[in-house]
């Protein structure tokens, strides 16, 4: 065993990254950072418009910009990064990708690009200003939905490729535990597949409806199917970020991983509980009875439990590593952390941001508290903290070693410094913007509306100072976005050649043996399906048969 | 390793608190698909306490796991009869019996027996419940009148769909067993 391991490590070191596998991740990352760049500028346009300092030209609609911003950053940026990162992880920890799997993930890549182009054309033409949630009865051009179908099919190709890769490894390594990063990958791809199922059903109902083949569509049913996907997507990025917190960060700070059992249980619990969390997005929707909403508060809050375990585990790792390096006192270990290393700094700020972000999420899950902030800018502030800080900064932190690793280049000291500065500017920008959004949301400013003073209403005018801060934050952010995209492409094509490590932390020396039940995915999926069935049956049975709506073009 | 039995006991007692029981029993599907499984899970968690305390009893009466499995199936099936739910809501003694039987005659034998029986029996049990849940689902959806005095018909239809969706989840699991052999991986 130990010998085989050494031989494998030596072979890996000698051969380096498989160039065919590296090309996959590189291509996914090129799309990721282009999406960040374009999506970022669209975000700035909105921020300036909301602050009342920039009027959109007549040929550009606020909601068009908003839809594109959401589509690029929520769907493209996050999912391309996730797939590129986990394929690099599987290539690294499972001894290279199978040729068949490579082919599948390439087909998936082209399907997503084709789908994206098909969806973007009606969007540019102004026929799809429905935002990334595309709630019926708002109806976009049929082509928009056809594009989404291709994107989902592309994601499924990537997911099935991952399943084949993992199954093949396990067949050749009977009785062994899947390497931890590939375990995270399995969890993420299981969620990507089962999470996109409901939205696929929704889109297949919408397409005949926009074509006029069926007259009406049940809006509540569509929204429910959407959020079964939407919330899962949120947790897919989160789980991707968490994988780096558990596995990569300990190595970067020179420590070891926290309990392997706990890590795997966190993945399992997130997979099982995730999809049903979508309900709290509909907590003020009509047609769902109060007892059902009450039950769902528990379903959603239960997702907070693994997050609390993660928070505990992370700080335990920091403390242990710091103490091993000779830290003294209660918080002395903080001084021993490598603050100047962007591979640590970015994910650390990401984790720290998740403390208020998670708390805000709990507010939104709680029926009574949510009444105050639902559909206000608070919610926008919340997901800019979660996606914009916790997830994005972790992704950026990963990019500083993964991009050079797959490109055969190194992260130089200078680039590291640029990375640290980028991270700080991003943090300043995102904090300013999201705090302003949270506060103005509490004062009642709605989300998803272009600039208006509501006929110079006093309350609406009172929002203006906060909205100016929103624009200031957005301006900082665009500087960081530009720098980050430059950094990514610099590390991919211009940085000096060399070898960059793929940092995977080891288990603790005295770690207890991980029980094998953590590897029984069929059982985990069965439990997940039963939980989903139990959660969705009451509202779905209530909705089905309700009268639907004809398609509306509201713009 | 006595944490599990303690969590199980706390869960059972929590489920028995009158306001908790009242909320869960106020909706038909929560009564059958949430309260009852939670009681079973509580018993499942408490099982190690009994199997360690009385090893002779379990090895004598449940050596092969099949008697325990039969007990599990019979009591589970009893509690899926509509009349049983009505009785539990009407007679406090039956309500008490529900908590005791589901915890100790379903949860405990399930934990003790599942590992003892062969794969074939395990799959047989899953097939049995797949068929039973499908049948019950059709019954609850298609029945022309109320099956329970305590619940209106629309709630009954919801419960029927609950049975069908769980049956589908079991079917998905059974179908993947045809294609994926766990022995290839372990």
Image: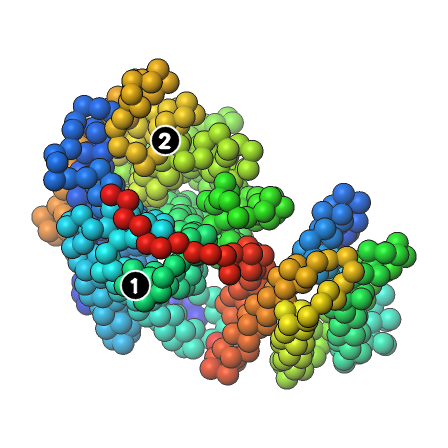
- The picture places residue B67, in percent across and down from the top left corner, at 80, 78
Check disc 1 and report the residue beneath it.
A212
How far apart are the two marked residues, 2 and 1, measured between alpha carbons?
33 Å
Q: Which mark is residue A446?
A: 2
Q: Residue at x 35, y 55 (%)?
A: A550
Q: Secondary structure at mark 2?
A: loop
Q: Residues within 10 Å of mark 2 (few under 14, many from 20)?
A: some
Decide which of A550, A380 is in the foreground and name it: A550
Check the residue under mark 2 and report the chain it is in: A
Q: Residue at x 23, y 50 (%)?
A: A128
Q: Residue at x 27, y 76 (%)?
A: A100
Left/right of residue B75 with respect to residue A457 in the rendered view = right
Left/right of residue A18 with respect to residue A368 in the rendered view = left
Check the residue under mark 1 and report the chain it is in: A
Height in image: A173 above or below A87?
A: below
Q: Nearer the viewer, mark 2 or mark 1?
A: 1
């Amino acid at each position: 065993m130990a010998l085989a391991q050494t031989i494998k490590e030596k072979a890996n070191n000698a051969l380096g990254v498989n160039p065919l596998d590296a090309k996959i991740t590189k291509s996914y990352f090129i799309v990721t950072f282009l999406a960040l760049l374009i999506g970022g500028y669209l975000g700035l346009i909105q921020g300036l418009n909301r602050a009342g300092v920039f009027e959109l030209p007549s040929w550009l609609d606020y909601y068009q910009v908003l839809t594109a911003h959401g589509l690029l950053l929520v769907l493209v940026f996050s999912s391309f990064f996730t797939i590129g990162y986990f394929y690099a992880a599987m290539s690294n920890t499972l001894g290279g990708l199978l040729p068949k799997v490579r082919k599948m993930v390439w087909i998936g890549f082209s399907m997503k690009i084709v789908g994206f182009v098909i969806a973007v054309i009606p969007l540019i033409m102004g026929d799809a200003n429905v935002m990334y949630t595309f709630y019926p009865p708002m109806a976009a051009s049929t082509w928009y939905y056809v594009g989404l179908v291709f994107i989902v099919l592309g994601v499924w190709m990537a997911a099935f490729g991952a399943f084949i890769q993992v199954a093949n490894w396990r067949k050749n390594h009977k009785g062994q535990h899947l390497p931890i990063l590939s375990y995270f990958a399995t969890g993420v791809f299981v969620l990507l597949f089962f999470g996109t199922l409901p939205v696929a059903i929704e889109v297949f109902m919408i397409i005949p409806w926009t074509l006029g083949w069926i007259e009406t569509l049940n809006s509540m049913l569509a929204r429910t199917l959407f959020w079964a996907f939407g919330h899962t997507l949120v947790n897919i990025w989160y789980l991707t970020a968490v994988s780096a917190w558990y596995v990569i960060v300990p190595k970067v700070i020179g420590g070891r991983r926290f309990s392997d059992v706990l890590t795997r249980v966190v993945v399992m619990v997130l997979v099982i509980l995730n999809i049903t969390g979508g309900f709290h997005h509909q907590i003020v929707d009509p047609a769902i009875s109060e007892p059902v909403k009450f039950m769902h508060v528990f379903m959603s809050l239960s997702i907070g439990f693994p997050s609390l375990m993660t928070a505990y585990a992370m700080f335990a790792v920091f403390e242990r590593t710091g103490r091993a390096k000779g830290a003294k006192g209660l918080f002395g270990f903080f001084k021993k952390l490598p603050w100047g290393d962007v591979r640590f700094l970015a994910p650390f700020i990401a984790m720290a941001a998740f403390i208020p972000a998670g708390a805000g999420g709990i507010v939104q899950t709680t029926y009574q508290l949510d009444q105050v902030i639902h559909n206000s800018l608070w919610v926008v502030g919340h997901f800019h903290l979660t996606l914009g800080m916790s997830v994005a900064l972790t992704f950026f932190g990963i990019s500083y070693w993964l991009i050079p690793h797959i490109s055969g280049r190194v992260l130089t000291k200078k680039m590291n410094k640029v990375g640290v500065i980028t991270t700080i500017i991003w943090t300043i920008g995102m904090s300013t913007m999201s705090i302003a959004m949270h506060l103005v949301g509490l004062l009642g400013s709605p989300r998803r509306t272009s600039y208006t003073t509501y006929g110079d209403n006093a309350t609406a005018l009172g929002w203006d100072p906060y909205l100016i801060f929103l624009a200031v934050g957005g301006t900082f952010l665009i500087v960081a976005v530009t720098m980050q995209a430059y950094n990514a492409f610099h590390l991919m094509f211009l940085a000096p050649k060399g070898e960059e490590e793929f940092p995977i932390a080891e288990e603790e020396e005295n770690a207890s043996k991980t029980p094998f039940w953590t590897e029984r995915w069929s059982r985990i999926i069965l439990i997940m399906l039963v939980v989903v069935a139990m959660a969705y049956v009451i509202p779905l049975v209530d909705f089905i048969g309700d009268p639907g709506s004809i398609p509306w073009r509201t713009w | 390793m006595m944490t599990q039995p303690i969590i199980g006991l706390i869960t059972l007692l929590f489920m028995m608190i009158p306001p908790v029981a009242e909320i869960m029993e106020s909706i038909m599907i929560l009564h059958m698909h949430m309260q009852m499984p939670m009681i079973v899970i509580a018993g499942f968690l408490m099982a190690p306490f009994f199997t360690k305390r009385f090893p002779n009893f379990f090895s004598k009466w449940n050596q092969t796991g099949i008697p325990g499995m039969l007990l599990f199936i019979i009591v589970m099936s009893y509690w899926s009869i509509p009349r049983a739910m009505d009785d539990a809501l009407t007679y406090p003694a039956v309500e008490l019996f529900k908590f005791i039987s589901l915890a100790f005659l379903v949860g405990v034998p399930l934990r003790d027996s599942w590992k003892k029986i062969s794969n074939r029996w395990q799959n047989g049990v899953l097939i049995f419940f797949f068929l039973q849940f499908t049948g019950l689902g059709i019954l609850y959806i298609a029945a022309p009148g109320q099956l329970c005095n305590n619940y209106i018909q629309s709630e009954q239809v919801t419960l029927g769909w609950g049975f069908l969706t769980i049956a589908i989840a079991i079917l998905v699991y059974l179908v993947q067993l045809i294609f994926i052999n766990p022995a290839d991986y372990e």
